[in-house]
Amino acid sequence: MILKVNDKNHEVEADPATPLLWVIREQCGLTGTKFGCGIGQCGACTVQMDGVAVRSCLTPLQAAVDKEITTIEGIASGTALHALQQAWIEEQVPQCGYCQSGQIMSAHALLANNASPTDDDIDQAMSGNICRCGTYSRIKKGIKKAAAELALTSTTKIENNG
Ligand code: FES
Ligand code: FES
């Protein structure tokens, strides 16, 4: 079976019902996506399927074939971190860090659909991502910082092209 992850095709062999999480980690070697609860309750395993945040612990491999899968390893452009990753560093968002790749993947999907989210939008989009260290207020700050940075970058691009 071919699985397309972060723009790269991976030949994988597993029962079609295998959770995508294990295929990504064990066969694609992408271990940034974490196992937390295994029952869709914590968000640690969040990846994107065609740009939509999904829980990879509950997504069977067969549902991911022919889709574009994006993991935390796929959002930077070469060596340039994504604005969210940069904001996470600047705001020192993580504590233990375990939940954070899932947090960022949910935030990334949010910003793709809503360039300027309100507090409520953020609360709603991030409600499925649990952080046992309680970094929620820094996560919110990080998302807002990244949204502002992305808005600035797109304004600069428009000005340079205009
Ligand atoms: S490990 Fe998937 S939601 Fe917790
Ligand atoms: S930073 Fe520790 S669980 Fe979120």
Image (cartoon, rainbow, N blue to C red):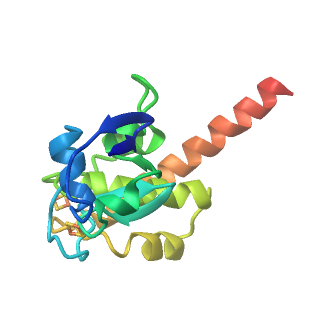
**161 left or right, relative to 29:** right
**3 left or right, relative to 144:** left
How far across and down, in percent of the image, does residue 97 sit? 18, 51
Q: Residue at 25% across / 62% down in the picture?
A: 135
**35 left or right, relative to 125:** left
In the rendered view, would you say 127 is above or below 158? below
- Can see residue 145? yes
Residue 2 lies in quadrant: top left
Ligand 2 is found in the corner quadrant, namely bottom left
In the rendered view, would you say 135 is above or below 70? below
- Residue in front for this viewpoint, 3 or 162: 3
- Residue in front for this viewpoint, 9 or 24: 9
Q: Residue at 25% across / 74% down in the picture?
A: 40
- Residue in front for this viewpoint, 147 or 32: 32
- Residue in front for this viewpoint, 20 or 106: 20
Say which quadrant the C terminus sits in: top right
- Can see residue 141? no
How far across and down, in percent of the image, does residue 141 sit? 41, 57
How far across and down, in percent of the image, does residue 152 sit? 64, 39
**114 left or right, relative to 37:** right
